[in-house]
Image (cartoon, helix red, strand yellow):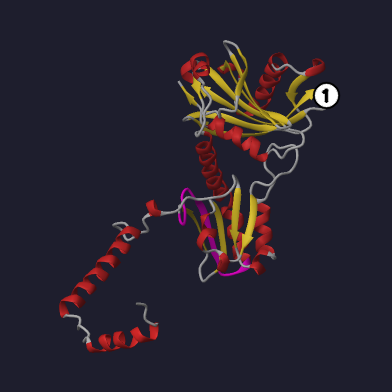
Amino acid sequence: MKYPLSDLELPLKRLNKDIPSIPKSKYYWQMKSFYIALFSFFVLFTSCNEGGKKDKTLLPNSVGNINSLQIIIPNDLWNGIVGEAIRNNFAAPTDGLPQDEPLFSMNQMPPEAFTGFARSNRLFLYVVLSDEDKATIAKDEYAKPQAGAVIKATSEEKLVELIDKNAPKIIEAFHASEIKERQRRTAISLMKTDSLKKVMGVSMKIPSAYRIAKATDSFFWMRKDLKDGTTNILVYEVPLTMIKNDSTAVGDIIKIRDSIGSKLLPVEDEGQFITEDAYAPYIFKTKLDGKFAYETKGTWEVKGAWMGGPFVNFAVRDEKNNRYLILEGFTYAPAAAKRDLQFELESILDSAKIE
């Protein structure tokens, strides 16, 4: 038989009323306090290391495109002399490109918006007025891998001064961080380079999208096809005497690459692949695989044809093998932005290991 709900509710209410509540014992409250304390200790332990610092093994993975820089600064500072100083330094033209492209692609947000997921960008620059004048570089502060910089000052004029003074070393730290990230992405799928190592005594982490376009017993040319162009890697060697000293280095390197390019790189209509003489290349001293090297950035052209693009060239002093090992990356992509294409090439060359 089915009863109306109202006929069942009354007896149940009476039954519940007649059952006395069971008081919680002292033991119950002691155990509850114990577990709360244990949970609090666990949270504290997992978020801090022995020195009381944040345990960075628990940080989330960073995000962002290569060379994408998050600027955290109040809107009024961004629109004034402080923002101008930031743009002058961190959006300065990248060396060696045929058209101006900024060092970093910047996105600005006010400090109150810099929370949660917004803190996961791989590069960040935090600029704010404070009661102290200080500039610091941070590593893996909110995510990993991450490179950041914090600039604080007591006035706008002092902020500008600290930005201008510290920008070179901050940019260097950001650049190194992004090279590692680009190499990490490249390592997901690598080209086999056994023949390069066997013939030229060097190995590099090259993406699998590249293929060997030409190889001899003293010259390697590897190429990746783009939608409207190519990126290219050259490897060859010259005697140590070919680059005499610092004062003649840039001229010597240009002569070497023009000689190799005009002879070994085929171009249409009997043109010659050479260094563009309208713009002087940039040259820097650096190290690659622990060895002294000249790094040269500039633009190339095909003489007699409307072709050109950027190049980066490393001349590595390999005294063990009595040679300069030349590693070069160049891009031909008339309709495309070239900063990130050249950055990928630079990261590949930077991965070189010389036997």
- Number of other residues with Cα within 10 Å of mark 1, as a class: few under 14, some 14 to 19, many 20 or more: some
Find residue 6 and report its horizontal and vertical position in percent.
Answer: 38, 86
Disc 1 target residue: 305
Among the 4 quarters of the image, the one containing residue 242? top right
Asked if the stretch drawn in magenta spans residue 148, the answer is: yes
Image quadrant in which the N terminus is located: bottom left
Quadrant in the rendering for residue 235: top right
Residue 194, given in percent of the width and then of the height, sits at 49, 18
| Residue 352 image point, x, y percent | 51, 27
Q: Residue furthest front?
A: 1
Residue at position x 74%, y 21% from top?
A: 273
**Magenta segment boundaries in residue numbering:** 141-156
Was residue 245 drawn as part of the magenta stretch in this picture? no
Q: Secondary structure at mark 1?
A: loop
Q: In the rendered view of the protein, which quadrant contains the C terminus?
A: top left
Of 235 and 268, the residue lying toward us: 268
